[in-house]
Amino acid sequence: MGMTSPIRPSALGASAAVTAFVLDQATKAMAIANTEILAAGLPVAPGFNLVLHRNTGVSFGMLDNVPPLALVALALIIIVWLAVLTFRAERSGDAAGYGLILGGALGNVADRLRLGGVTDFLDFYIGEAHWPAFNLADSAIFCGVVVLLLWPRRHVQRRTDAI
């Protein structure tokens, strides 16, 4: 019976990034393909609608007046930094967290480059108060941050040989 080697953190991080990116792009493509239905909003459940929105700014529409290429350039710098963190991570949790953030960032940059803004379609609300619409890339970024903050931290002892 052969033993399987454990998954390397970098492979886990890369898998998380690819999964987040693919799911984000697939769901955005479905939302865009149903523009007519989602333009006015599609009630799904109490407190949740699907609605098509193009965000030319960043989170919550901030920096809406910044040129799109400046936002792309900033995002690409962050993406390179996240890729380095993902592939240097020694812990699986860190790699997964960085990978989720990386995949989400790549999904939103792909939208900016192709469409001039980020496609948002998830609309949660309570009464008349609506949370700003978002997408799966934003969810992946949020979940990645949560993983980085809450994943159990075990002290890693480095083994050193005494001389």
Image (cartoon, rainbow, N blue to C red):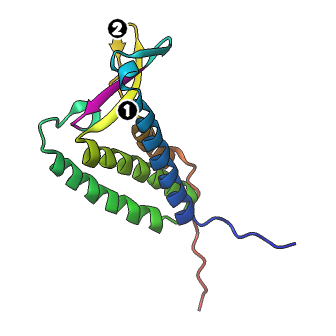
Q: Are marks 1 and 2 in contact (CB under 8 Å)?
A: no
Q: Nearer the viewer, residue 157 or 89?
A: 89
Coordinates of residue 110 in the picture (x, y in percent): 33, 49
Residue found 27% across the figure and 57% down from its top:
76
The residue tagged 2 is 128
- 58 left or right, relative to 47: left
Earlier along the polypeptide chain: callout 1 or callout 2? 1
Q: Which residues are magenta?
A: 50-57
Between 29 and 46, the one nearer to me in the picture? 29
Picture coordinates of residue 139, whole percent (x, y): 44, 37
Q: Residue 114: horizontal and vertical position, in percent?
A: 28, 46
Note whether 44 is above or below 127 in the view shown: below
Q: Kindly state the secondary structure of the residue where label 1 is placed.
A: helix
Image point (33%, 62%), residue name: 80
Image quarter hosting the N terminus: bottom right
Front: mark 1 or 2: 1
Disc 1 target residue: 32
Where's residue 31, x and y in %?
A: 41, 30
Please tell me whether residue 110 is drawn above or below residue 1 in the rendered image. Answer: above
